[in-house]
Amino acid sequence: MSGLTRDDAAYVARLARIDLTDDELDLYAVQLAAVIGHAAEIAALDTDGVEPTAHPLPLRNVTRPDVVRPSLDRAEVLAQAPAVEDGRFRVPRILGEAL
Amino acid sequence: MTGPPGSATSAAPGARPSPALDIARQVRAGSISAVEVVDRYLAAIDALDGELHAFVTVLHDAARHEGEVIDRRVAAGEDPGPLAGVPVALKDNMCTRGIPTTCSSRILDGWCPPYDATVVQRLRAAGAIVIGKTNLDEFAMGSSTENSAFGPTRNPHDPTRVPGGSSGGSAAAVAAGLAPLALGSDTGGSIRQPAALCGVVGMKPTYGTVSRYGLVAFASSLDQIGPFTTTVTESAVLFDVIGGQDLMDSTCLERPVPRTVAALADGVEGLRVGVVSELVNDVDAEVGARVDQAAEALAAAGAHVEACSIPELRHGLPAYYIVAPAEASSNLSRYDGVRYGLRVEADTAEAMNAATRAAGFGPEVKRRIMLGTYALSAGYYDAYYGQAQKVRTLIIDALALAYQRFDVLLGATTPTTAFAIGAKVDDPWSMYLSDVCTVPSNLAGHPAITVPFGADDSGLPVGVQVLAPALGEPVMFQVAAVLEGRAPVLAPPRVHA
C-alpha cells in the first residue's frame, strides 16, 4: 500500500461518520498510508494454516438465571441525553434523508 | 510542604516506605483519621497540580465525606478493610456515579455516569477513598498524555517532559505524592510505559482477572485495568483488592484469580529468567544497560538468567496498530450524540452524528478511528485485520514456547526515558514506537510489571519489565520484589509533596 488519495480518506471518513475538513483528509491520507506501510511488514509473513486470534482467552457465553434484577434508573439515564421526548431519546429525522 | 502522612513510618528495616499500607495501618488502628489523610493529600494536590496537571477532577468534598464515613466506622469498632482511608486516584476513563467521567474528550462533555465501575465498588469495599480523576490521552489513545482535550500532564521528574501515557495523570500523581495509589488502564502499555517514565511501579494484570465493567472501552480484547504504586508490595495488595470474577463482565475469568501478596517474600532462588533480546537490543543504550544490570541482580539473588530471542515479538507493534484501532473504530461508534455527551445539531440523524464526532473527537482519536475503519473495510479486511489476528497467534505461540524454558521474561519497559513535550506529536509512528516493548503482553493477554531501576545520565527514571504467562502474577511479583530490593536509588522527583 503505497498511498492513499483524499478520496480514499473521504470514503473512510464517511464510513466512520466523521465530518473531516479537506486539510484533515489530506493529513490523514498521508499519515494512514505511513502506518499502513508499517503494517505491510506483517502482510508478507507466511501465515498459512495459522488460526487467527480474536481474543486472548478461550471464552464461552456467560448467562445468569432469568430473574428480574434492578437495572439503571430510566430518568437518571435520560437525564444525560442531549434531547429527550416522552421518556425516549430524541434524534433528528432518519427517514427521507437527502441522498 | 511536609510529606504525606505515614511516608516514613513503620516500614520494615531496609524496605521502601509504602505510603498506602502505612496509612491503612494507622487508620485501622485509629492513630490517624482518614479525614486528616484526605486533607493532607488534597493540600498537596492544591499546591502542586497547577504545575503538573495530573488531575482532571479533584473530589474535595466527596473525598472528605468518604473519610468521615471511614472514621465513624473505625470509631464504632469496625474494620473498613485493607485500604482503610487510603486515597486513590482513578484514570478518568473509569465510571464514577454522579461524578464527571470525561476520558479527556470533549465528546463526553458534561457526562456523569449513572453507575460505578466494578473496580470503584471494590476499592470502596476495601476502605479506599476516591480522591480524584486523572488526565489521560483522549480515550486512552496515546503514549504521552498530550492528546488530552484538557492539555498535557507534566512529568514530576522534569516538567518540560511528558509523563508517558495514556495513563500519564495516574503515573504523575503517584510519582509526585499527590495520591498514594492510582488505577490506570493498559491496552498497549498505557500503565507500564508512564509508570516507567515517572519512576513508579505499574502493572498490567492477566486479561480477564480484573473486571472491565465501567471501564470506557478502547480495544476490548486488549484493555485491562491495573495499579500504579510506589512499591511492589502495594501493587500486589491493590491487585488482590480489584481482581476477581464479576458477573457484569462476561470476559472475566471464571477461575479464581491468584492471590499475590503471599508470594512477595519467596525470592528468586532457582527461578529461570529469560532476558529477551528483542526487548533489549533496540532500546536506548542507557535503558538497555539498566536491564543488563537488573539481570545481573537477579542472577546474584540466585536466579538462572539466560539470554533468549523471540523474533516474533518484532511483529507485535504493526499487529497491535491494526488490531487496536480496528476494535476502537467499532467501540467508539457509540459516541453519536444520541444518548450522552456532546451533540452538534443538524437536519438529519446522520449529519448530526458526523458533525458531533467531528467536533467532539481530537486529532489522534480521529486518526485511530480512520485507521481502524480502513483496516476493517471491504477489500482490506483479510490483508490487514485478518493477518494481524494471525500474527497475534504467532506471538502467543512463541511466548508459550519461551515459557517452557523460563518462569519469567525480562526486558525494557520503554525504548527511551521521558521525552520532551511536543517532540513526537507530529509523527504518529515515532510516538507509536514508545509501545514496542509493552504491546506483546496485551496481544497475548499476559501479565507484566514495570519496576523503577535507576535513572539515565540525565536523572530520568528507567523501568525494567517482568513478563509472565497468563495467571503468572505470583511469580511475576516475586521477581519484581527482588528487583525492587536491588534497584539503584532513584532521586525523588523535582515536583513532589
Image (tube, helix red, strand yellow):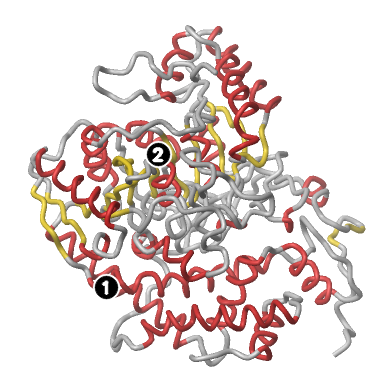
Residue B399: x %, y % from top left: 24, 65
Chain-order first, disc 2 or disc 1: 2
Asked if A60 appears above or below B351 in the picture, the reply is above
Mark 1 belongs to which subunit? B
Instruction: Please name the residue that numbered disc 2 is placed on.
Output: B200
Q: Amino acid at mark 1?
A: Glu
Query: Looking at the image, which is closer to me, B96 or B462?
Result: B462
Residue B194: x %, y % from top left: 45, 48
Asked if A94 appears above or below B170 in the picture, the reply is below
Asked if B41 appears above or below B172 in the picture, the reply is above
A93 vs A5, left or right, is: right
Instruction: Please name the residue that numbered disc 1 is placed on.
Output: B312
Residue B78: x %, y % from top left: 50, 13
Circle 1: element type = helix
Query: Looking at the image, which is closer to me, B335 or B471?
Result: B335
Q: Quadrant of the N terminus of chain B?
A: top right
Label 1 near label 2: C-beta < 8 Å? no
Residue B372: x %, y % from top left: 56, 76
Q: Residue at x 79, y 67 (%)?
A: B356
For the residue carrying disc 2, how many other residues have a C-alpha within 10 Å: few (<14), some (14-19), or many (20+)? many
